[in-house]
Image (cartoon, rainbow, N blue to C red):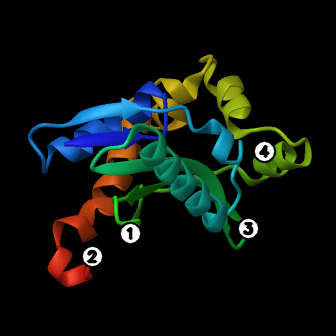
Amino acid sequence: MIIAAGTKNPAKLEGIRRAFVKYFPDVKLNPIDSASVAKAQPKGLEEMTAGATARAKFALSRAGGDFGVGVEAGIFTIGEVYFDNQVAAIVGPSGKVSLGHSAGYSLPREAMEKLFSEGKELERWAESVSGINEVGDKGGLIHYLTKGRMTRTDLTEQCVVTALIPWLHLDVYGF
């Protein structure tokens, strides 16, 4: 099975790989830089979903394959609580798209409000808090916050597994 992955991020690529090999024994990833088709710092689930979908479609159109996969991390709010979350989109050759989410976790409100008012990305704040350059390409902020118990790869795997559900149950989802 050939997967066009709309990312060059090593943590995301490993999460995509882990998710697909749970269900498909022979998986080959074709990574494509899709940064040009998504916002640098998505805010809200709609922007995150749009970014993941754009990345998946772009990857499939450029690399071909059985599926295109896009993963978009971003921030959304429930009331006054900010959450970090990842959304995965999987697109098939027919154009049908499925979506999935990772576990979300809360972020400090004051820091996020300052971040947005300054027009900065979460990655910069995560680097300053964790002391790790390019933390998003490594274990991610979640790795630092959970004291090494969870990684960005784990979150990517979660959202891709949940996005695979309709493809695993075509009869139920009508794909």
The residue where tag 4 is placed is 111
* Distance in Å between CA atoms under marks 4 and 2: 42 Å
**Amino acid tagged 3:** Glu
The residue where tag 2 is placed is 175
Mark 2 or mark 4, which is nearer the start of the sequence?
A: 4
Callout 4 environment at 10 Å: few (<14), some (14 to 19), or many (20+)?
few
Q: Quadrant of residue 10?
A: top left
Secondary structure of the residue carrying tag 2 is loop
Question: Can you give x and y, in whole percent of width and height, for residue 103 in the image?
Answer: 42, 56
**Amino acid tagged 1:** Lys
Q: Quadrant of residue 65?
A: top left
Callout 2 environment at 10 Å: few (<14), some (14 to 19), or many (20+)?
some
Q: Are marks 4 and 2 in contact (CB under 8 Å)?
A: no
Q: Is residue 139 left or right of residue 116?
A: left
Mark 4 vs mark 2: give the one in front.
2
In which quadrant is the C terminus drawn? Answer: bottom left
The residue where tag 3 is placed is 80
What label does residue 96 carry, if any?
1
Residue 62 is at least partly visible in this image: yes
Q: Is residue 20 left or right of residue 24?
A: right
Mark 4 vs mark 1: give the one in front.
1
* Distance in Å between CA atoms under marks 2 and 3: 37 Å
Secondary structure of the residue carrying tag 4 is helix
What label does residue 141 carry, if any?
none
Secondary structure of the residue carrying tag 3 is loop
Give the residue displayed 39% in from the left and 29% down from the top. 148
Mark 2 or mark 1, which is nearer the start of the sequence?
A: 1
Q: Are marks 4 and 1 in contact (CB under 8 Å)?
A: no
